[in-house]
Amino acid sequence: MEHERQQLEQSLMAGLSRQETKAWLHQYAQPFKELMSCYRCAAMEVETKFNVLNEELSLQYDRNPIETIKTRIKTMESIIDKLNRKGLAITLENIENNLFDVAGVRVICSFPSDIYMLEEALLNQDDVRLIRRKDYISNPKENGYRSLHLIVEVPIFLHRQKRLMKVEVQFRTISMDWWASLEHKIRYKKNVEITHQVAAGLFECAEESARLDRKMEEIYSAVVCREEGCGE
């Protein structure tokens, strides 16, 4: 508890004076921890939804469309830094109303088609509300990054109340995920300049990764079709 308080104080000091930091801690330290607990519950709620879908769809398709599910909650440092960059005061209201990626769930799928199937299944649930959608698979970023991003709102049920919480969901295939992870390690390596040549090489790898995704799905579809006797 004391360690968390010290971390929070250090983070706040980057944007507030010592006196302002003490005032913030006095007013918000406990409510901040409670809010982060709500975000953790929301991430668990979404993760559970995907585990249930994976179990159901494995019976239908004779395989698990989800390879792995990862959850994360933004650190105090990241939250405060993002509010500072947005020019917003460090308040609980600004966290809830302006930061939609405090809670994150990353779903790693086998094939690109699995991503859109799972997206549809999730959004068809009547307690899930779509806030925002960005499809970087159909429209990759300039650096080659591919992923489907959703901001959804889900209810969590606490001891005495129900709260609606926002969660960012990222869908990737296995190849999209390893490319994004390695690209981040290379691009943000300390004291290393990313030259045009390096950026071009990373983009080329992203394109090759997407080509392999398409090829593997074509091979899988051909195998399934042969097993099921398509066209006979």
Image (cartoon, rainbow, N blue to C red):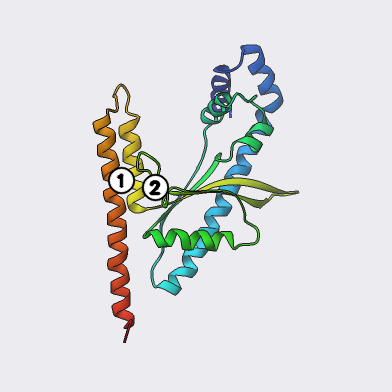
x 60%, y 48%: residue? 42
Q: Residue at x 52, y 33 (%)?
A: 75
Measured from the top left, where is residue 33 in percent x and y?
Answer: 63, 34
Q: Nearer the viewer, residue 165 or 179?
A: 179
Question: SS of the residue at dot 1?
Answer: helix
Residue 206: mark in rendering: 1
Q: Residue furthest right?
A: 160
Is residue 133 shown above or below 102? Answer: below
Assess disc 2: are there few (<14), some (14-19) or many (≥20) residues with their C-alpha within 10 Å of its C-alpha: many
Residue type marked 2: Arg
What amino acid is found at the position of numbered circle 1 in the picture? Ala
Marks 1 and 2, how far apart at CA? 8 Å
According to the image, label 2 marks what residue? 146
Q: Could you say where residue 181 lies in the image, as x and y percent from the top left? A: 35, 41
Q: Residue 58 location in percent, x, y? A: 43, 69
The quarter of the picture where the C terminus appears is bottom left
Q: Are marks 1 and 2 in contact (CB under 8 Å)?
A: yes
